[in-house]
Amino acid sequence: MSSDAAAGHAGVKTAVRADTEVNFGFWIYLMSDVIIFAMLFVAYINLSDRTAGGPSGAELFHLREVFFETMALLFSSLTFGLAMLGLHAGKRNAVIGWLAVTFVLGACFIGLELHEFMTLIEEGASFTRSGSMSGFFALVATHGGHVTVGLIWIVVMMSQLATKGLTAPVASRMARLSLFWHFLDLVWICVFSTVYLPWILQ
Amino acid sequence: MSVSNPSHAHEPTLAGYLTGFGLALILTLIPFGLVAWDGLAIATTLVVVAICAVLQVLVHLIFFLHLDMSEEQRWNTISIAFSAVIMFVLVGGTIWLFYSLKFRMMVGY
């Protein structure tokens, strides 16, 4: 056992341990998501040059749009971190405030992505156009769907923080939302490096 | 047996998040800057983009997801290492298979 002398720590320690186990379960889910994304990446990589005579990413993707999407997610990772710092400091209003900022940044990302999707479809490059576009939409929309779930989760946590306060279960859920949100930013790094930048370069 | 890390040692810090954010920002600006500049050979740029992506993933894992080999995080780290092996087999194997297939069938060439 741990050499923690203070007996008062025992309760906290047990709570932390139980929390660690639940978080580990959620982590295993994220690892299964990693495999799903890996296969979508593979599908995209193998299909990306199969444009069936249609437009390719070189004509369709715009660096500026992708840059703003990337920045929105990166800044949202920082603001979520600040929310977690507020949680550890026991400052409820700071947590709710930073979650709100994170939500706005995430919503900006989704807005930009939907705008991009609609522009692509208007330009005749919807997911039915070619294997390349099928692979693109399957991968990028799966990521966008995850971010949308994250946004809903943020709203749920904001309302729980407002009504229940900084209780142990709420803090525990925040820890898992933190994993989820940072994980989505991590997947996006792979998306812009694999999908967008190589095409824009050509 | 185990080193008694006080639990607050693993609590995130402002310095940690800011360091992670700074590094991630640099590792994002380098690939976007190179692609916007378009001054290097495509292959060179792609290699730099790939290196920056791998480094930034590591930065996120360490500074945002707080992975390390501490008692609290050890199994998370081991499971992601295992997932990385599975990913390598799936991604590497599938790409190899399809390029080999394309080469043998010369589809569209």
Image (cartoon, rainbow, N blue to C red):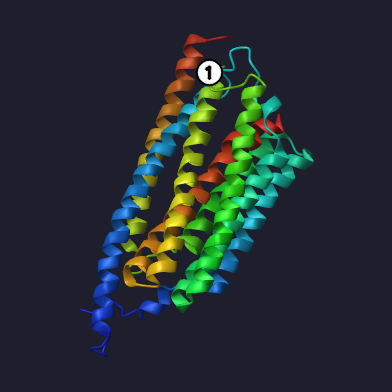
The image quadrant where one finds the C terminus of chain A is: top right
Q: Which residue is depicted at the point 32% across and 60% down? A: A23
Residue sitting at 62 percent across and 51 percent down? A72
Residue sitting nearer the eye, A127 or B54: A127
Please determine whether, in this image, residue B31 is positioned above or below residue A52.
Answer: below
Q: Residue furthest left?
A: A1
Question: As shown in the figure, which amino acid type bears the numbered disc 1?
Answer: Thr
A14 or B33, which is in the foreground? A14
Q: Is residue B61 visible?
A: yes
Task: State left or right for residue A7 relative to residue A175.
Answer: left
In the displayed structure, does residue B41 sit left or right of residue A48? Answer: right
Q: Tell which of A5 and A65 is nearer to you.
A: A65
- Which image quadrant: the N terminus of chain A? bottom left
- Disc 1 target residue: A128
In the image, is B50 to the left or to the right of A84?
right
Tag 1 subunit: A
x, y (%) of residue A123? 67, 22
Q: Callout 1: 10 Å neighbours few (<14), some, many (20+)? A: few
x, y percent for residue B13: 51, 74
Tell me if residue B12 can be seen.
no
Residue displayed at 61% across by 24% down: A121
| Vertical relation: A9 (above or below) A135 | below
Looking at the image, the residue that sits furthest to the bottom is A6
In which quadrant of the rendered view does residue B78 lie? Answer: bottom left
Report how many numbered discs are placed on residues in the image: 1
Quarter occupied by residue B16: bottom right
Task: Say what secondary structure mark 1 lies in.
Answer: loop
> A141 above or below A102?
above
Residue at 31% over, 80% down: B4
| Residue A96, position as x, y percentages in the image | 51, 67
